[in-house]
Amino acid sequence: MIDCNTLIGPYPFRHVPHPEPEVLVRVLAREGLEGAWVGHLPSAFYRDPSEGNAALYRALEAHASALRPVPAIRPDWPRWEHALRAARDAGAPAIRAYPAHWGMGPHDPSMRELAVAAGEQGMALLLTVRFEDLRQRHALDVAGDLSAAAVRSLARAGDAVRLVVTAAGREMIEETHWGLTPAERARVFWDISWIWGPPEDHLAKLFTTIGTERFVFGTQWPLRLTQSPRANLDLLPPNLAGARLADASTICAAATPGHA
Amino acid sequence: MSAPPLAGPGPLIDAHAHFYHADAGRADWAGVNAARFRAGERIGITYHVASVLGSYGFSSPTYFPSPADVTRGNDAMLAMLDVESERVRMFVTVNPNETGHAIREIERCVERGAIGVKLLASRRADDALLDPIAELAGERGLPVLHHIWQHRRREWPSQEISDGGDLARLAARHPRTRFILAHIGGGGDYMHTFPAVIDQPNIYPDLSGSGVDRGMLDAAVSALGAARLLWGCDLTMETGLAKLRALDAIGLPADEVEAIRWRNAARIFPPGAFPRCAAADGKQ
């Protein structure tokens, strides 16, 4: 199992201990994870993420067997198509985008274009609902959470689209999932980093109603404890014990390009 | 033969738990209670120290419960205590805006086994209305678990929120009363809380809440020391288990982990409140 939702680099609004790739590799080993998709945390807050992507590629070079880059690509920035091809050439399994942080609305056409283009090149588009709980955010952190409407819009953009939505809770997942056709739902995967376990058992309910195949393992390291999603799986009710999540490596292999 | 507890075999006290009842406005209330016990067994929780928050908004607001809802909720908690005395302990919930009722509820429920007082967000923590409750709790040796919003910068709807600074002012007026500062992972900026209560030794933050920020536990231990922290879950038990595992991962010495797991709770609650912990300790 791999961790689809990790980052390296500092966070602008609070101190995060040791957000370095060397530490991530040790954490993965400790947690029994085979590898991780890794983004560059500061790039979410850069106007132009290009330098952040370059830093990400450099930082992961020494850990290529375990850590795969997930660069940030901003589709309203000139020559973003070049950045997308560079991501593909670098072996990125996915790219990241932060439409809420970049001031893009839920139906931004450039985001839809990016989602389709990434899928056609065999890469998922990884979205972040939030980095922190709303109640603790810095006064300057005004982007707000990614909306379910934005995810639905991207899921409807075309057959090639593959989305990995991280840090969503039960309500957003349900609102999105049941607001899509079966074909559109099949394009969306959710990480389990922010879903509640017992006693409310949101994760168990989602596994039962939506299916485990729509979920991937993600932690949001270094912002959150890696132990939390694992604990959530450990505490599933007996009838769901041993539930198998989607294999992240196959997310884009199942894409059918060219039918948007 | 059941699987070994995920959190290990030692005693473990959840100092911040809740249960529901038939008048709590949700049809699945019994299932949620059962899920808490199911997860508790799996984790290895020896005692759930729990409260019922009125009607949880069904007939009066969760954080501003009416006297009737306070009594109904406490009755439900007492009934739970009768049935689950082996693994449940009780906080009596009160609304300080109804001072006389609050005092009577504390007397009534302590008589039947409550070992602590639960205050919600019905009145700012440093308000004088809380003084008779804090005074009585001190006299009886009952810890007061106070709902806290870590660093309040403005008012939020549905609560009259308090933060560490507010609670510290109340705690300073009642030095013999022990206060549990609720859920450092329960929303707000916990990094504000630690310095806000550091000089008030009768405040014991609990680790509960859905928040699992990396660095939060390290900072809590560094600022306050393990002797002032209590383990708990509140509404999310997977984060409770994750925090126990994280305490090990950050290299906290075994005796300090043990203090957070149960010894601190055993020290601040009335003597003899947790006999199964004492028994297990004797076997170690």
Image (cartoon, coloured by chain):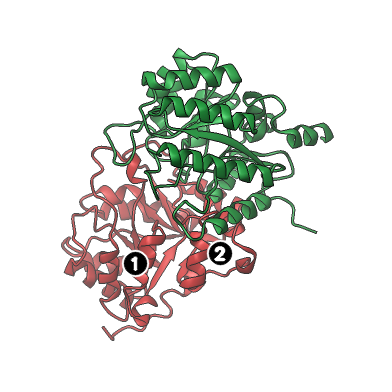
Chain colours: A red, B green
Q: For mark 2, does the 10 Å Cα neighbourhood hold few (<14), some (14 to 19), or many (20 or more) residues?
A: some
Q: Residue at x 37, y 44 (%)?
A: B60
Asked if residue A215 is positioned above or below residue A226 in the image, the reply reads below
Q: Residue furthest bottom?
A: A259
Q: Chain of mark 2?
A: A
* Residue A236 in view (yes/no): yes
Q: Nearer the viewer, mark 2 or mark 1?
A: 1
Q: Residue at x 34, y 52 (%)?
A: A130
Name the quadrant containing residue B189.
Answer: top left
Percent x, y for residue B261? 64, 35
The residue indicated by pointer 2 is A1
* Residue A91 in view (yes/no): no
Q: Residue at x 57, y 70 (%)?
A: A244
Percent x, y for residue B14? 60, 40
The C terminus of chain A - image quarter: bottom left
Q: For mark 1, does the 10 Å Cα neighbourhood hold few (<14), some (14 to 19), or many (20 or more) residues?
A: some
The N terminus of chain A - image quarter: bottom right
Given the image, on which type of amino acid does mark 2 rest? Met
Instruction: Give B258 or B275, whichever is nearer the viewer.
Output: B275
Name the quadrant containing residue B47.
Answer: top right
Given the image, on which type of amino acid does mark 1 rest? Glu
Residue B256 shown left or right of residue A11 in the figure: right
Q: Which mark is residue A175?
A: 1
Percent x, y for residue B108? 57, 30
